[in-house]
Amino acid sequence: MQSLKELYKIGIGPSSSHTIGPERIANYIKEKYPNCQYKIILYGSLAATGKGHGTDKVLRKVLGKDVEIEFNLTEKDLPHPNTLDVIVVKDGKEINTVRAMSVGGGSIKIQGVEYVEPKSVYELTTFTDIKNYVLSKGIRLYEYVYQTEPDIKDYLKTIWQVMKDSVERGLSKTGILPGGLKVQKKAKYIYQSDDIFVRDSLLRNKLTCAYALAVAEENADNGEIVTAPTCGASGVLPAVLYYAYKNEHVSEDIIINALATAGLIGNIVKTNASISGAECGCQAEIGTACSMASGAIAEIYGLTIDQIECASEVAMEHNLGLTCDPVLGLVQVPCIERNTMASMRAFDSFCVAYYLAPMRKIPFDTIVKTMYETGKDLNHKYLETSRGGIAKNYKID
Ligand code: SF4
């Protein structure tokens, strides 16, 4: 199992393959060929949906406003569906053409440069094995993370800062999201709405929804976010953590520990199943984010490892079968609202686990396996192809 640094990545939304990967490619080019001009040709899926996802915006942000970008939909002989060429020009002469691929999850490959897979750092890869280990040592899950990755705490502090910033930026904005769907930003509206609710739990729902919307809207608007575990599901975990921090006054040290626990849960799913909507549907993205968030809340409130496992298991179990059907291929409908639902469900799962953990029987590893098998059985229409579900039936005005 890889480092949590491979799960939590900082980048520009809305898509790890269409914005975070290209942003990394652009940074590589800028570092290798400084003070040059660049012309970029996007192919395959980057050409087909790059405009809606803001791939061109991200490339220009890194390499300069005047970069020429061509969208080539005719070239079929490609090494990967997300391929691009960068033609490097110096003193008016083309000095090189670099072919690069955004291969998913923000990872990139540069043609001709040896690709080194991130190394495995966690020996234990299932919840059961990790649970047995931490129980034998009398430690908590986050302590297992710190033991395995002694330098991870500083990285997690940076991750938390980016999460906080994305919530706060998102709460301050209004307007329409890019891409043609005319989706309105709603985080500020809900955040500033009158509190008609008299019960604490309903007020908590309003606030977590506002925080989840804030990040998911930032993601859709090419803002900087953290993949948790993906761009599309990036609002769920920050929403519950920000609620704990801002409204329950939980210390940042405890929040960082919860981030470590949540990262471990996400990593278990990534290693043993999938966190990709294109591979296993939205259950793999939002379902995993919900498990991470529920586990994080359970960690914050000091629950036992059985209760943490139960919270994450319940969160995933009741997202099973969730399809991926984004309208126009944009990460907006149903994605943004789905983040709000999962953030509330994370609290509900925590609540169920708090009371019922001793009476429940399904191990987290079993639900992860079930999610994966369910994903493999899903019709391709529901695997980020935008050919079924809401993407097919919603008529855009
Ligand atoms: S519907 Fe698809 S694109 Fe949207 S959040 Fe879910 S998995 Fe991601």
Image (spheres, grey):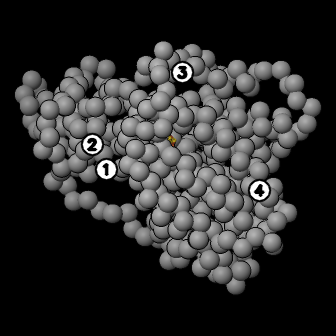
Q: Residue at x 64, y 23 (%)?
A: 186
- Tell me residue 26's x, y (percent): 30, 37
Q: Relative to residue 24, is residue 243 drawn left or right?
A: right
Separation of marks 4 and 3 at Cα, in angstroms: 31 Å
Residue placed under numbered mark 2 in the picture = 82
Separation of marks 1 and 2 at Cα, in angstroms: 7 Å
Circles 3 and 2: CB atoms closer than 8 Å: no
Q: Amino acid at mark 2?
A: Asn
Residue placed under numbered mark 3 in the picture = 183
Q: Relative to residue 221, is residue 329 drawn left or right?
A: left
Q: Amino acid at mark 3?
A: Val
- Tell me residue 55's x, y (percent): 34, 31
Residue pushed farthest bottom?
136
Image: 371 above or below 249: below
Separation of marks 3 and 2 at Cα, in angstroms: 26 Å
Q: Which mark is residue 252?
A: none
Tell me which numbered mark, 3 or 2, is placed earlier along the sequence.
2
Of marks 4 and 1, the one in the foreground = 4
Circles 1 and 2: CB atoms closer than 8 Å: yes
- Tell me residue 357's x, y (percent): 79, 68
Q: Residue at x 63, y 31 (%)?
A: 214
Q: Which mark is residue 350?
A: 4
Q: Amino acid at mark 1?
A: Val
- Name the one closer to the observer, 378 or 72: 378
Helix, strand or loop at mark 4: helix
The picture quadrant where one finds residue 16 is top left
- Tell me residue 150's x, y (percent): 57, 67
Image: 318 above or below 244: below
Residue placed under numbered mark 1 in the picture = 103
Helix, strand or loop at mark 3: loop
Q: Amino acid at mark 4?
A: Phe
